């Protein structure tokens, strides 16, 4: 990739120390790039490490989580070398997050405008009047009438709460927005509205967006490139077109096949039997091996490296032919 | 079809009174279900599709007797369900003429008939994380319907019924699950337990309220396949409630699209998906995500949200959000127009079936 990435994640490994002294490796050797103004989809089943990736990049891991190796470059600067104080100046101003479950992420006893105002006042030197003006602008940007800023979250519908969360994340004009399952609990029409809103904001502000979701349909609608995660590792990574039209990893292929397509109804849907691996008890070889229906004998023994079968397309599977991928 | 349909709903209404305060009189009602009719044959799958607040869940709750309808009839195998049935089967005094009296006498009625109905109609709820009692073992959860209905009192028989239900729901070997608790299971397995508990009574009708919307996509397919298998093997009829047209496409025989308490379009799945007639159906269909970036298409995104069901717009209830509404739509509540033999839509802009 020629363009200087806005965010470059390299070989990121994150572990959690559990109560019995056990260690769960939530992420291992995760690498991907986010170019300015681009939308990247992080896809996978629950527990595959999508949210942990976001939290690692934001350095918001819970106290039992630690990043054991890797680099997180933001505009060329490695965020892992920063002090907590320096890191604070990156959060919200450079990268912001729309948390999962918009229904519950807002403070129920605080007016919407005050909640957004709080985010501004904490990070920007600005007086209250200016902050309130900015709140009005933000609300309008996400399609909420200014006057409704005086209301409380319970007076908002689910879609509006999600809009308010997006407005809040934009409070300090970040250049990178993480959206963690932003449409999961919403109806299809409201989902379409929220995705449209993200697209409009991206265009207007030149934002880069990392969209975390388990829904490949949503990713296909909005993403330029896709990172498919499985059991804490990158299974496949490439442009959206490569992922959807020439998927190399059996997991990606099954995931795509299990998606009901309204245009091509079939008799039976493919599904992936079994469950994702426990992070405390990972298979020795390929993490997908126990559920894979095209596995080779060596898959149980050797964890496959990331192969580059094609330009800007990376697959971690023994069945895939190509040169070994090197991320610099 | 010569045999009586499993389920027939005739002009069903369900209004919820809204009071400004406890003592004030009822001055408005939320018209959750506003004149809905449909039938369901044996082994048939009907999908009721619509956004939240369109009344789809209220229909299911009314069908199973969790709500009492305001008006209209529900017939299960040709028998009337609801207050009338309760009255006739218990031989108690008729329900009073006013709403309050009716409610009071209903509370004193032994719900024998309702219980009988609930043996034959079962509901699958949306969230397998919340619909299972965390303190019960899987065996207790699946056996509970048998206990409630006093079926299979013998220990051996009960065991075998629970075992069969779990295995039919794909939890094999069933004994491995008997003593486990819901928190030990994955989301997909929990939903299988919910289905086993519904199937243990061998019902004729399943009401599935968004059975897969809380699940990961890879597990959705698994649960949909299971429901389909049960429908084909057991001949159980299913009312499948969802907001997602893509899950319906492969599963339902017929689709009924609801908007603000009314079915606005209904017909065979293929036909409705291939040539939707109502502008609301067209919009819903256009926003279904397609899992291929090459096929990104023009979306019809409706602005705003479904209006408050206490203030249903005049004329066609969809006109304020309709992209093709004209003057007459504000005045005339559109009747159903027959598009083809089985396919109808309530829209003034739809042209009726050509004769011949």
Image (spheres, coloured by chain):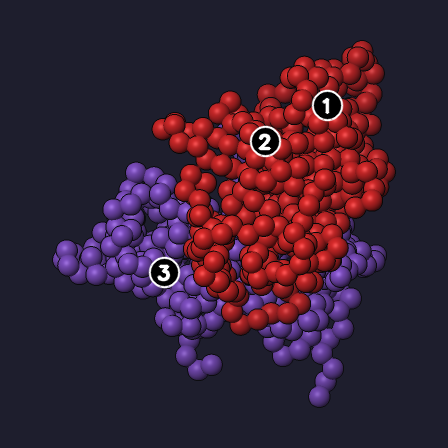
| Image position, residue B48 (x, y; %) | 56, 60
Q: Looking at the image, which residue sits at the far right?
A: A204
In contact (CB < 8 Å): disc 1 and disc 3: no
Image label count: 3
Image quadrant in which you'd find residue B168 = bottom left
| Image position, residue A7 (x, y; %) | 73, 35
For mark 1, does the 10 Å Cα neighbourhood hold few (<14), some (14 to 19), or many (20 or more) residues?
some
Q: Secondary structure at mark 2?
A: strand
Q: Is residue B335 left or right of residue A38?
A: left
* Same chain check for tags 1 and 2: yes
Q: Is residue A75 visible?
A: yes
- Which mark sits nearer the N-terminus, 1 or 2? 2
Identify the residue shown where x is 59% and y is 21%: A109
Q: Secondary structure at mark 1?
A: helix
Q: Looking at the image, which residue sits at the far bottom?
A: B356
Identify the residue shown where x is 56% and y is 58%: A318
Q: Which residue is mark 3?
A: B169
Q: Which residue is mark 1?
A: A90
Q: Which residue is mark 2?
A: A69
Chain drawn red in the picture? A
Q: Is residue B5 above or below residue A279?
A: below
| Image position, residue B229 (x, y; %) | 42, 68
Chain B takes which shade in the image? purple
């Amino acid at each position: 990739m020629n363009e200087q990435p806005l965010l470059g994640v390299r070989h990121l490994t994150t572990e959690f120390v559990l109560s019995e002294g056990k260690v769960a490796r939530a992420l291992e050797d995760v690498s991907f790039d986010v170019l300015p103004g681009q939308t990247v989809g992080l896809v996978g089943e629950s527990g595959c490490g999508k949210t942990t990736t976001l939290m690692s990049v934001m350095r918001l891991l819970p106290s039992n989580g630690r990043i054991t190796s890797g680099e997180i470059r933001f505009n060329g600067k490695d965020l892992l070398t920063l002090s907590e104080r320096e890191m604070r100046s990156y959060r919200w101003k450079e990268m912001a997050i729309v948390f999962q479950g918009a229904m519950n992420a807002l403070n129920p006893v605080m007016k919407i405008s005050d909640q957004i105002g709080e985010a501004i006042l904490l990070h920007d030197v600005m007086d209250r009047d200016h902050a309130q003006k900015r709140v009005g602008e933000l609300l309008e940007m996400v399609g909420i009438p200014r006057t409704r800023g005086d209301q409380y979250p319970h007076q908002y519908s689910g879609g509006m709460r999600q809009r308010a969360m997006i407005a809040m994340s934009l409070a300090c004009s970040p250049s990178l927005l993480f959206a963690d399952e932003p449409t999961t609990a919403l109806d299809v029409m409201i989902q379409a509205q929220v995705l449209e809103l993200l697209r409009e904001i991206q265009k207007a502000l030149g934002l880069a967006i990392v969209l975390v979701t388990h829904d490949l349909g949503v990713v296909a609608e909005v993403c330029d490139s896709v990172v498919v995660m499985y059991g804490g590792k990158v299974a496949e990574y490439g442009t959206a077109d490569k992922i959807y039209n020439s998927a190399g990893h059996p997991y990606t292929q099954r995931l795509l096949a299990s998606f009901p397509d309204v245009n091509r109804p079939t008799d039976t849907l493919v599904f992936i039997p079994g469950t994702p691996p426990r992070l405390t008890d990972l298979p020795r070889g390929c993490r997908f091996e126990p559920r894979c229906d095209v596995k080779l004998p060596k898959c149980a023994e050797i964890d496959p490296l990331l192969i580059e079968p094609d330009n800007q397309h990376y697959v971690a599977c023994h069945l895939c032919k190509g040169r070994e991928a090197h991320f610099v | 079809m010569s045999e009586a349909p499993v389920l027939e709903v005739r002009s069903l209404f369900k209004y919820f009174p809204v009071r400004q305060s406890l003592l004030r009189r009822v001055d408005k009602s939320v018209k959750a279900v506003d004149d809905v009719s449909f039938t369901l044959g044996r082994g048939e799958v009907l999908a009721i599709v619509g956004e939240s607040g369109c009344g789809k869940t209220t229909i299911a709750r009314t069908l199973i007797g969790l709500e009492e309808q305001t008006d209209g009839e529900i017939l299960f195998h040709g028998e009337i369900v609801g207050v009338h049935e309760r009255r006739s089967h218990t031989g108690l005094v008729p329900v009073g003429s006013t709403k309050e009296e009716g409610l009071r006498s209903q509370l004193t009625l032994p719900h024998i008939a309702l219980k009988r109905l609930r043996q034959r109609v079962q509901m699958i709820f949306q969230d397998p994380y919340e619909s299972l009692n965390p303190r019960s073992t899987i065996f207790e959860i699946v056996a509970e319907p048998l206990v409630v209905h006093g079926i299979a009192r013998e220990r051996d028989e009960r065991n075998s019924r629970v075992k069969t239900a779990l295995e039919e729901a794909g939890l094999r070997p069933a004994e491995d699950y008997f003593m486990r608790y819901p928190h030990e299971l994955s989301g997909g397995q929990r939903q299988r337990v919910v289905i086993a508990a519904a199937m243990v009574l061998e019902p004729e009708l399943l009401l599935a309220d968004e059975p897969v919307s809380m699940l990961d996509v890879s597990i959705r397919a698994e649960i949909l396949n299971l429901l389909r298998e049960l429908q084909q093997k057991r001949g159980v009829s299913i009312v499948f409630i969802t907001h997602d047209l893509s899950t319906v496409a492969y599963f339902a025989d017929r689709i009924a699209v609801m908007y603000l308490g009314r079915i606005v379009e209904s017909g065979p799945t293929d036909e409705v998906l291939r040539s939707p007639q109502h502008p609301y159906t067209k919009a819903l269909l256009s926003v279904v995500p397609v899992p291929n970036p090459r096929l990104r298409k023009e979306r019809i995104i409706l602005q705003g949200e479904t209006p408050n069901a206490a203030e249903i717009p005049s004329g066609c209830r969809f006109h304020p959000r309709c992209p093709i509404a004209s003057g007459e739509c504000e005045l005339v509540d559109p009747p159903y127009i027959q598009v083809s033999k089985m396919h109808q839509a309530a829209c003034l802009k739809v042209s009726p079936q050509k004769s011949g």
